[in-house]
Image (cartoon, rainbow, N blue to C red):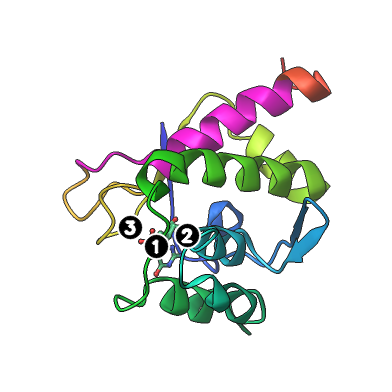
Amino acid sequence: MTIYFYKVWEPYGCFSNFSPHGIEIRGTYWSTVEHYYQAQKFVGSVDAVIIPLISAAQTPEQAAALGRCSTRKVRCDWDVVKTEVMKEAVLKKFLTHAEIRETLLTTGDNLLVENSPNDYFWGCGANKTGENYLGKILMSVREEIRSLFCRYQ
Ligand SMILES: Nc1nc(O)c(N)c(N[C@@H]2O[C@H](COP(=O)(O)O)[C@@H](O)[C@H]2O)n1
């Protein structure tokens, strides 16, 4: 079976990076994975000044809008590091919050797919042919958590 998720208020909404589950990474707290991910785009870039603004954004939608500003310069290695950045943050989210960790584990070996109609990298896109990197990361985090917590095996 395939489990599709996208919006926070829909089934399995806790798998979205926009879900309200904070993470602490290297001593800094981020309200959502999306806040962290968007801010990392500017580490070491000439536009690093935007990082505290992204961090302070009231919502993940606002954080994403700031991070997607086309006039800002993203770090030059972003395409190389972005999946690792995402993996670290998603793993931290599920290690931090026990209730959503249980939800992730209850999905067993089902395929997880971010049903984003316009994102063919992190999601499956409108025609379901996208790369689904967020789903792939969630499944690898599920595997890692299974071996760490030794349950549902
Ligand atoms: N829940 C949700 N709402 C949206 O509007 C979205 N676009 C997404 N997808 C997430 O967006 C992030 C990718 O951002 P960039 O395009 O790299 O700026 C990533 O977290 C997707 O999972 N989700």
| Circle 3 residue | 116
**What is the crowding at mark 2: few (fewer than 14 residues within 10 Å), some, or many (at least 20)?**
many
Q: CA distance from mark 1 to mark 2?
A: 5 Å
Relative side of 20 to 85, left or right: right
Q: Residue at x 56, y 51 (%)?
A: 15
Give the magenta part as a residue range: 129-146
Q: Residue at x 24, y 43 (%)?
A: 130
Q: Position of residue 74 (x, y in %)?
A: 39, 62
Contact between marks 3 and 2 (CB within 8 A): the answer is no
Q: Which mark is residue 74?
A: 1
Q: Quadrant of the C terminus?
A: top right
Contact between marks 1 and 2 (CB within 8 A): the answer is yes
Relative side of 34 to 120, left or right: right
Please determine whether, in this image, residue 57 is positioned above or below residue 109: below
Q: Position of residue 113 (x, y in %)?
A: 40, 43
Q: Position of residue 78 (x, y in %)?
A: 41, 49
Relative side of 68 to 60, left or right: left
Label 2 beta carbon less than 8 Å to ligand 1: yes
| Circle 2 residue | 41
